[in-house]
Amino acid sequence: MTGRGLVLLALAGLLLAVAPLVGDRYVVSVLTTVLWFAYVGQAWNVMMGFSGLLSLGHTLYVGLGAYVSAALFVHYGVGPWAGMVPAMLVAVAVGTFIGFLGFRFGVKGVHFSLLTIAFAEVARIGFDHIQWLGGSGGFFLPVEAGVSDPLNLRGSPLLFYYVILALVVGALALSRVLLHSRLGYQWLAVREEPEAAEAVGVDLFRARMTAVAVSSALTALGGVFQAFYFNNLFPEQVFSMGRSIEIILPAIVGGIGTLIGPILGAFILTPLGEALTFVLEESGFDLPGLKQLFYGVALVVIVVFRPEGVWPWLARRLRLVRQPGEGA
Amino acid sequence: MTALLTVSGLSKRFRGLKAVSNVSFEVPEGRILALIGPNGAGKTTTFNLIAGVFPPDEGTVTLKGVRLTGLKPNRVCAAGIGRTFQIVKPFGELTVEENVVVGALARERSVAVARSQARAVLERLELLDQAARPARSLTLPDRKRLEVARALATRPTLLLLDEVLAGLRPTEVDRMVEVLRELNRREGMTILMIEHVMRAVMALSDQVVVLDHGEKIAEGTPAEVVADPRVVESYLGAEEG
Amino acid sequence: MPIDYYLNIAASGLLTGLVYGLAALGLSVIFGVVRVVNFAHGEMMVAGMYGAVLLAGFLGLDPLLSAPIVAVLLFGCGWVLQRGLVNKFVERPEHMQFILLLGIASILVNAMLMMFGPDARNVSVPYSFDTVEVGPLLLDAVRLRAGAAAIVVAAALFAFFRFSRTGKAIRACADNPLGARVVGLNIDGLYALTFGIGAAVVGIAGALMSLLVDARPQLAPEYTLLSFIIVIVGGLGSLPGALLGGMLIGVSEALAGFLLMPSLKSLFSYAVLIVVLLLRPQGLLGKRS
C-alpha cells in the first residue's frame, strides 16, 4: 500500500473504533452485520481468492461453528471462548474431509463447487432431523435481559460490535501475513496455474488442504459469533444455499483475492440493502423479493462492468496501492 | 563422462496408442542434449514422463543414480529438475518477480531470501526492468524467458526446456541461445531441450536424440544426426528445419 | 407389504424422473455446447411452470398443449440471454460465469416471487385425479402423460441433433469450436440457438411438472440443484445420460421418500451425487476427458 492508502486504512479503523460512541443502536447493529459479512468474506477469500477453490457451500462451516458452540453452551455450559476451539476443529475436520475426497479423486472446477454445495445441502437436511439440536424447529440459546457476561459472550450489542471488529482486524492481519508468506505465494501460484506450480515444487494437495483448513476454521469462528449474537439457529436458514451466496457476495463485489475487497464489498452491499429496505418501507412499496432482485441486478452489473471487483479499480483510481500484482 | 540423467526403456500408451515406446538415452553432466523429431513424435510426452506429469507404463528415469520414476512433479522438482512448458504457463496475475519468487521458494523457506534470489535470476535473463509488471502483460519472448527464469530459480541440476525458441524472431532466438550458452558454459548447467529451430540445435547442443512415432531412431552429434538418412527421411524431409 | 406396492412407487418415481431428466437434458445441452453451467436452470423451469399455470388460468389450456407456447417464450429468453450477456463470458474464468448466472437466477426467482407471491399455484385438468391401470400397476393419469410427453420431447431433441443440419452444426461446434469457426460456422449464432433450445427444453419440463407439483418460486434453487445432480450422475454432456440420471434420481427419491421420511428424500439424491462425483466423476454415461 502507498502512504495514502495506509493513512486511509488507519482512518477507517479509527472511525470504526469510535463509531458506537457517536452512532445509535441502529447504526451499531448495521455495522455489526457489515463487519460480520466482511469477516466471513475474508475467510471465504482464503479459499477462492488465494487458492482458486470455489466453495459455494461455505455456509456449511458457519453452521457447524454455530451449532457446535451453541450445543456446548446449551447442553454442557461450555462458554464460546472455549467452545470456539472444538467448533473450529469440527469445521476443519469436515472441510479437510471434503477437500480430501475432492482432491484425491481429482474433482475439479465446477464439480468441486458442486461437491461443496452437496455437503452443505446434506448438512441442511441432516440438521433438520437432529432433535438434540432442535431439528427443523430451531435451536435456541437462553437469553436473559440485562446480563453482562463477556466471558460467555453474553451482553450488550456493543460487546458484539467490538468482538466482530476485532475479528475483522485479526482476519485482515492474518490474511496479509499469510499472503506474504511462502504458503501464500504457493497458494497464488496454485490459483493461477496448478500445473506450473507443481513443476516448481509446490505440493498441490498440501497447498489446497491448508487453504481449506484455514478458511473453514476462520469461517467457523464467524458461526460461533452468529450463534451467540442472534441466539437462534434454523437449519433452513443457516445451511441454505442462498446463505452461501450471500456470504460470498461481498468478496466478489469488493474484489476476489484482495485483502480489502471483502471488507469494502460488505460496506457497499449491506448499507445498500438497508437503504433499499428503508426506501421501500417509506414508499409503501414493499414487495417481498424486491431487495434480492436488486442484489441480483447488482451482481450482474458488477460482474459485467467491474469483473475484478470494486477495490482494485478504486485503489488504482485513488493510488492506494503500489504494485499491480498485489491487491493491497 | 558421467550421466546426470538416465532414461531407460521408457514407454507410455494413451488409450492403447503408443506415444513413447522403449526410449533410452543419457544426458551427461554439463552438456546440452537436444530432443528432436516431427510433430507427434513423442517428445513432449517423454518430457512429461521425466517431469512426473504422468508415470510411464514401463521404464525408469534416474537423476544422479536416484530413481525418479513415479514421483509427482513437485518431487521431481525437489530432486533437481526444472522445467518450462511448451505453451507458456505464467502465473498471470502475479508480477514477474513474484513468478520467480515462487520458483525460488522451492528450496528456500524465507520469502526475503527468495526475493533476492529471484532478482538475481531476473537480472541474468534481462527481465529485471519488467519485475513489477503483471506476468500476463509480457510479450511472448519475455514470457518464454520468464519460463526459463522461474525454472532456474528452483536451482535445478538439470533444466528441461520445451521449445523455448518456438515463435521467436531470429534476433530473439539469438538472444535466448546466448543466454542458454552462458548458463551452460559459465555455470555448467546441464540442459535437455526439445527444439524445432534447427539452427539453434546445431549451435547449442552437444548431442541430439531423434524421435519418430515414439521411438528413438537416431542419436549422435548434430552433424552426425543431420547426415543420417533415416533422420533426413522422417524429419528433415517432412518438415522445414 | 406386497411387491406391487413398491413397483407402483418405483413406476411413478420413474415417470417423474423422466420429467426431471428432460429438465437436466436442457442443462446438459447448454453445458455440452456453450461450456457454461446454467445456474439459472431451475429458475427457468419454474418460469415454465408459471407459464403453464397462467395459460391454464386465462385460456384454460392443458399444460400439454401450452408446453409448445412456453417453449417458444423460453427459447426467446434463452436466446436473448446468451446473445446479450452470457456470450461475453464464454471465454472468462468459470467462477465469473457462475456469478453472472447466479445473478440472473436471483433476478428471475425474485421477479417471479414479486409477480406471483410465495403461495403455491396449481393447474387443474379434468383428469387430475384419474388413475390408469397398466398391468399390475395403478398410475396417475397426469404422471403418465407428463412422462410420455417428456419422452416425446427428448426423442425430438435427439433426432434434431442427429439428423438436422443445424443439429449437426451444433454438435461440430461442441466438439471443436475452433475448427467449427474455421469452416465458417457462425459460432455465436449457434451458441445462442443452443442456449435457446436448452431453455425451451427446461421450459417444457416445467410445463409438464406443473401437472405434478404446485408452482412456487422456492422450487427454483431446488430444481437447479436437482438438474446438476442428474447431469453429473448421468454424465456431463451426455444426452442419454441425463435422461437415465433423471429416471434413477426419480426412482430413488420416490423409494427413499416412502421408506425413510419424505423430508429425507433429497438427502438420498445428494448421497448418490457425492458417490458418483468420487467414484465416477465423468458420470454413468459420460466419457472421460
Image: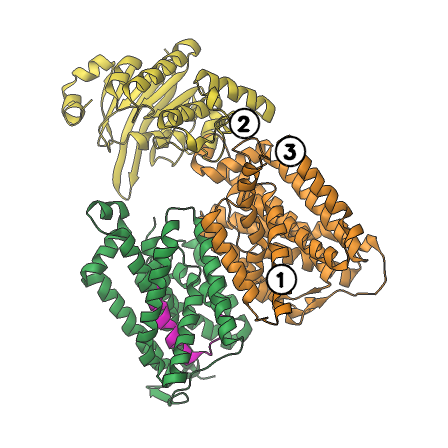
Chain colours: A orange, B yellow, C green
Name the secondary structure under disc 3: helix
Percent coordinates x, y for residue C122 in the rendering: 45, 82
Are discs 3 and 2 located on one and the same chain? no
Measured as percent of width and height from the top left, residue C44 is found at 41, 67
Quadrant of the image occupied by residue A12: top right
Residue drawn at the location 30% of the way across and 17% of the way down:
B171
Labelled pair 1, 3 in contact (Cβ < 8 Å): no
Instruction: Let me know if marks 2 and 1 both belong to one chain.
Output: no
**Above/below status of C265 relative to C185:** below
The residue indicated by pointer 2 is B105
Chain of the residue displaying label 1: A
Placement of the N terminus of chain A among the 4 image quadrants: top right
Is C205 one of the magenta-colored residues? Answer: yes
* Residue type, mark 3 in image: Arg
Q: Nearer the viewer, residue C121 or B148?
A: C121
Q: Is residue C179 left or right of residue C35?
A: left
In this rendering, position of residue A32 left or right of residue A42? right
Using the image, name the chain to which the residue with label 3 belongs.
Answer: A
Label 1 or label 3, whichever comes before in sequence order:
3
What is the spatial separation of the Cα atoms under label 2 and label 1, in whole angstroms?
A: 40 Å
**Which residue is drawn at the image coordinates 40% and 56% (left, top)?**
C37
Kindly give the residue lying farthest to the top in the view shown.
B186
Location of residue B11 by image quarter: top left
Q: Which residues are magenta?
A: C199-219
Q: Which residue is mark 1?
A: A238
Q: Amino acid at mark 2?
A: Leu
Residue A55 visible from this viewpoint: yes
Front one among C263 and C162: C162
Front label number (3 vs 2): 3
Residue C215 location (% of width, % of height):
46, 76
Q: Which residue is mark 3?
A: A4
